[in-house]
Image: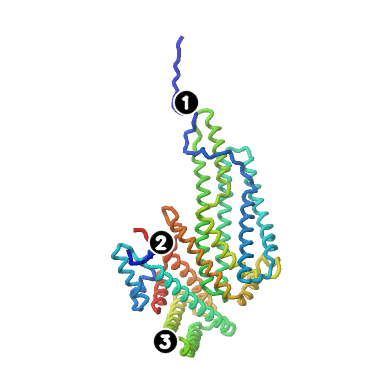
Amino acid sequence: MDTFTVSAPSALVLTNEVHSNIDVSEIQQPKFHGDNALKIVEENALYIFNNLNYIFAQYKIKPVLNINELREHIMAETKKQIEDINKRIDEILESKKPIGVKIKKIINILSELKKKDLEAISEIKRFIEHLLVESNIPPVVLGNMRLYLDIDEKLTEKLWDIKLRELQSLLKILPSRYPGRVKQVEKRKKALLEKTLKIEIYREIRPYERNTRLNACVILFYILLNCIDTLDDVHPINLQKILKKSKTLNIEVLNDLNEKLVESLHALIFKIAKYNETEPLLTMRLLSKYTLTFWATMVSTY
Amino acid sequence: MPRESKVSFIVDTNIIIYDVLEGITPFSRTLGFFFKEAKDHGYTLCITQQILDEVKSILKDILNYSVEVYRDLREYLRKCSSKHHKSHALPLIDSFFKEKHNALSKQKGELSETAFERKRNQLRFLEENIVISIYGANAFTVKDAIRVVENLMRTLMDDYANIYAMCIHRIVKK
């Protein structure tokens, strides 16, 4: 009778390890809770509004509208949207479709969110341009806000791209061709997917970004709150009314707030400049020769 | 290394600061000194915190003054547009800047000579800028000229943000 001596085809079988570049050491089967995103947004809103109250008190600004009422109004709107997204994500995670399909669907949702996020920033940028042309607010206040929004846009885009790249890299992980490994790899992919879906804010940048965002918010809110009489005016914002009233704003307070914004902006820019990336996070387009000539001529008068 | 500078910044050579060096003002002479120092030590251009602050305040002044003038011009053209909707904008612009120059002349005693000269030159440049833009856009009616003025304001804000960011975002690495 022939006897076969079966040798192990590879070390993989013996060690029972999945051959991939996934770092599984930190995975503890986290469960994705749809409430996470909502909780983070609520915390941020509370943080911003509390600081808003503090800064208003410091500068003795009396907003026309009750800030707590406004926060509840804004959160009620936001809550609906976040719940809708959470529902869609939960449905995808709970469905019995292959993991690759789930990841692709979630990538689509996140791309949608990225688009919305960037659109929101462009919307504020347009509002700032409108204020520049139609109101008497000092141009430099608006110019600094514009600069902040440029940075915010780049940062937001970058953070979304990182998140999307993480998900796309999950798609590239091939399951092992040995029986028994497929399930293991899929399980780990699922765990990584859930981990990636948690909203992780970069601790290094976030405090600066949040601080800058706060100051820009304060200026915008100051403009808005002094011009809005009831909550009904918040949505949709009655722009002409706001612009008409913005001419009576206290310019000194705005300038003070502007100084604070510039300080935060510096902190943020230095933080970004030290950011360990191959390409600079902040890239500005080159100015045209015509523009350059104008600024050069103006500067030459000093 | 530039002498006694705690923080150094690098600025693209083809931007505004480089052009300033060709002018002969105290500000540009100081910048010229730093430019030479920086070049000797292999940097494109180094400026100290003090100079950087000066650059920023100048940019701020230019933006505020230019937009202020253009806002007034826009209002002036708007008032005229109700009567002369399709009339030629250039004579109106000319009379607006004449009024501005007259108003400035009345302030002569209040301002220092340097500040007065600066405002006068800046008004000339602003007029030149708007006239060139109107010719460039072929926008000779009042209605079109208002659009050009608004676009110019937006461009100014855009440029300000760009130059400001360019001045501060790169930290020197040898």
Q: Is residue B82 above or below residue B7?
A: below
Neighbourhood count class around disc 3 (C-alpha, 10 Å): few under 14, some 14–19, many 20 upward: few
At label 3, the amino acid type is: Glu
Q: CA distance from mark 1 to mark 3?
A: 89 Å
**Residue designated by label 3:** B113
Q: Report the amino acid beneath label 1.
A: Leu
C-alpha distance separating marks 2 and 3? 37 Å
Residue pictured at 62% horizontal, 48% vertical: A36
**Callout 2: helix, strand or loop?**
loop
Instruction: Please check whether the numbered discs 2 and 3 fall on a single chain.
Output: yes
Q: Position of residue B156 (x, y in %)?
A: 48, 72
Q: Quadrant of residue B48?
A: bottom left
Chain containing the residue with disc 2: B
Say what secondary structure mark 3 lies in: helix
User: Does the residue at mark 2 contact the one at mark 1 (Cβ under 8 Å)?
Assistant: no
In terms of depth relative to the viewer, which is nearer, B149 or B34?
Answer: B34
